[in-house]
Image: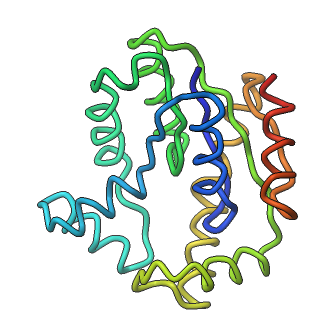
Amino acid sequence: MNIILFGPPGAGKGTQAAKLVEEYKLPHLSTGNIFRAAIKNETPVGLKAKSYIDAGELVPDQVVVDIVAEALEDDIYANGCIFDGFPRTVFQAESLDKILEKHGTGDAQVIALTVPEEELIRRVLSRGEGRSDDTEEGIKNRLAVYQKETAPVLAHYANRGQAKIIEGTGDVNDIFNRIKAVLS
C-alpha cells in the first residue's frame, strides 16, 4: 500500500504520517526529512536544495524525483510506504506513478488535508523548525507556490479516483480517525 499525504505546509502531514506508520506498519518517506538531513550534512544535493529553500522556492522536479526514486530502491519500501511532501507537481506525480508501477507496489492513495490559511501560518510559526523562510511573509510565499504548483497534483489523482479530501483541523486523533475511515 502506498499513501500520499497531501496538503500545504502546516497541514499536519508529518503528524499524521507518524500515526499512519504505527497503524499500517509502512515506512515513512518524507522528502522534507531527506532534504533536512542532506542540508545538515552539507551534501552537494543538500546545499543545492538549501539554496532553493532559502529563496522560498521548490527544489526542481527532476532532482526531487531522482532522490525519491533512489530512496525507493531500499528494500524497506518493498511493500509500499507513506509519502509526505511528495509529489509536489504533476510531473512528480506522473513520475511517481511510473516508479510505483516499476516496483509493483500498487497505486498510491492520496489523503489531502485541508486547513484554512490562517491556521497554516499559525502552525508553521509555532513548530519552530528554524527554516530561514519561517516568517509570515515566507510562509505566505510557500503557500502561494503550493497553490500554483502543487494543488494541481490533487486533480491528477482525483481524476484517477485515488484522492480523498480530509478536514485537517481539530484534534489530531479525530483527524487520524477520518483518515483511517477513508483508507478502510
Q: Position of residue 108 (x, y in %)?
A: 60, 25
In this rendering, position of residue 49 left or right of residue 45: right
Q: Which residue is drawn at the image coordinates 60% and 53% (left, top)?
A: 150
Q: Which residue is drawn at the image coordinates 63% and 56% (left, top)?
A: 15
Which is more toward the observer, 30 or 67? 30
Where's the N terminus, which quadrant? top right
Which residue in the rendered view is the most extreme toward the top? 104
Q: Quadrant of residue 70?
A: top left
Which is more toward the observer, 23 or 97? 23
Is the residue 26 above or below the residue 152 in the image?
A: above
Q: Which residue is drawn at the image coordinates 65% and 45% (left, top)?
A: 19
Which colour scheme appears in the figure? rainbow
Q: Which residue is drawn at the image coordinates 57% and 67% (left, top)?
A: 145
Which is more toward the observer, 91 or 118? 118
Is the residue 90 above or below the residue 104 in the image?
A: below
Q: Position of residue 124 (x, y in %)?
A: 61, 78
Is the residue 51 above or below the residue 25 in the image?
A: below
Q: Position of residue 30 (x, y in %)?
A: 45, 48
Where's the C terminus, which quadrant? top right
Q: Quadrant of residue 74?
A: top left
